[in-house]
Image (cartoon, grey):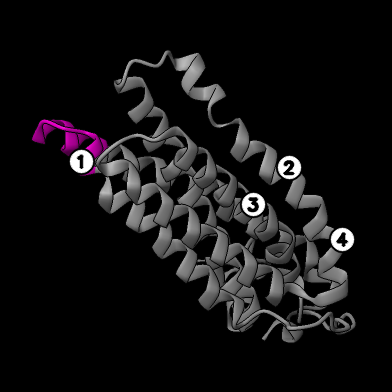
């Protein structure tokens, strides 16, 4: 176990810092919502006759929103802190999940694209404050580890979201209808938004100076 190693790859003491743990959880929640949305919606569109290329192209509003909001979030995090941006991100995910629930009865493209924009904005606004929150409160010599952990959490969460969405698709097909069986998935996306709001409570409300180098004891 890492706690028994003289030089651990991942220092367990870092998880005693509330802001760091909240950032890791936030990264997991955001990217579970992202991968769940991506797989469920593209599968739904293909079931309704869209080609894989067209279904993939339909997700461009989500990519565009994330691309536009990410640099804005990075600019604002140094001015207003991580908490307001995480609150915005959580709210966007809740709105996106709520809009997706309308697809249960009928796949209306304007609502789908609006959901894509909301979820993409949530992802864009979340990335910078998640990294900021991960390293906030830690000494500078732990910043690289904290940032790497947040990045790893994103990758793990993407795989988890795909697994959850794949299980939902499989069970929906067994029941005979995909669109009407995806409501739990859309509710899950909205619930991820609520989770981000809760993680935001542990984030700094304004940019605070980080402590100086202090070795391992500073992480606890």
Residue at 84% across, 84% down: 208
User: Badge 3, how many Cα within 10 Å: few under 14, some, many 20+?
Assistant: many
Circles 2 and 1, Cβ within 8 Å, touching? The answer is no
Bounds of the magenta span?
169-181
Residue at 33% across, 41% down: 103
Which of the image's four quarters has the C terminus?
bottom right
Circles 3 and 2, Cβ within 8 Å, touching? The answer is no
Mark 3 vs 2, N-terminal side = 2
Q: Secondary structure at mark 1?
A: helix
| Residue 68 visible in rendering | yes
Q: Which mark is residue 84?
A: none
Mark 2 vs 1, N-terminal side = 2
Mark 1 vs 4, N-terminal side = 4
Mark 3 vs 1, N-terminal side = 3
Across and down, in percent, residue 61 comes to 61, 36
Query: Which residue bears the numbered disc 4?
Result: 75
Query: Which residue bears the numbered disc 2?
Result: 67
Query: Which residue bears the numbered disc 3?
Result: 121
Q: Secondary structure at mark 2?
A: helix
Magenta span dominant secondary structure: helix
Query: Which residue bears the numbered disc 1?
Result: 180
Above or below for 3 versus 130: below
User: Badge 2, how many Cα within 10 Å: few under 14, some, many 20+?
Assistant: some
Residue at 55% across, 50% down: 119
User: Badge 4, how many Cα within 10 Å: few under 14, some, many 20+?
Assistant: few
């Amino acid at each position: 176990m890492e706690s028994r190693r003289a030089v651990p790859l991942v220092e367990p003491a870092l998880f005693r810092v509330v802001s760091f743990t909240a950032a890791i959880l936030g990264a997991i929640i955001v990217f579970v919502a992202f991968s769940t949305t991506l797989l469920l919606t593209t599968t739904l569109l293909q079931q309704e006759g869209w080609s894989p290329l067209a279904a993939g192209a339909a997700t461009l509003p989500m990519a565009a929103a994330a691309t536009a909001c990410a640099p804005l979030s990075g600019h604002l995090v140094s001015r207003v802190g991580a908490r307001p941006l995480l609150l915005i991100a959580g709210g966007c995910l809740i709105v996106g999940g709520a809009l997706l629930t309308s697809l249960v009865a009928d796949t209306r493209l304007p609502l789908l694209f609006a959901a894509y924009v909301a979820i993409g904005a949530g992802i864009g606004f979340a990335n910078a404050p998640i990294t900021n929150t991960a390293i906030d409160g830690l000494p500078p010599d732990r910043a690289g580890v904290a940032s790497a952990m947040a990045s790893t959490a994103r990758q793990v969460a993407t795989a988890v979201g795909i697994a959850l969405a794949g299980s939902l698709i499989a069970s929906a097909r067994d029941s005979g209808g995909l669109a009407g069986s995806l409501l739990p998935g859309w509710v899950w996306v909205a619930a991820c938004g609520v989770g981000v709001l809760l993680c935001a409570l542990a984030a700094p409300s304004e940019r605070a100076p980080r402590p100086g180098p202090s070795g391992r004891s500073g992480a606890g």
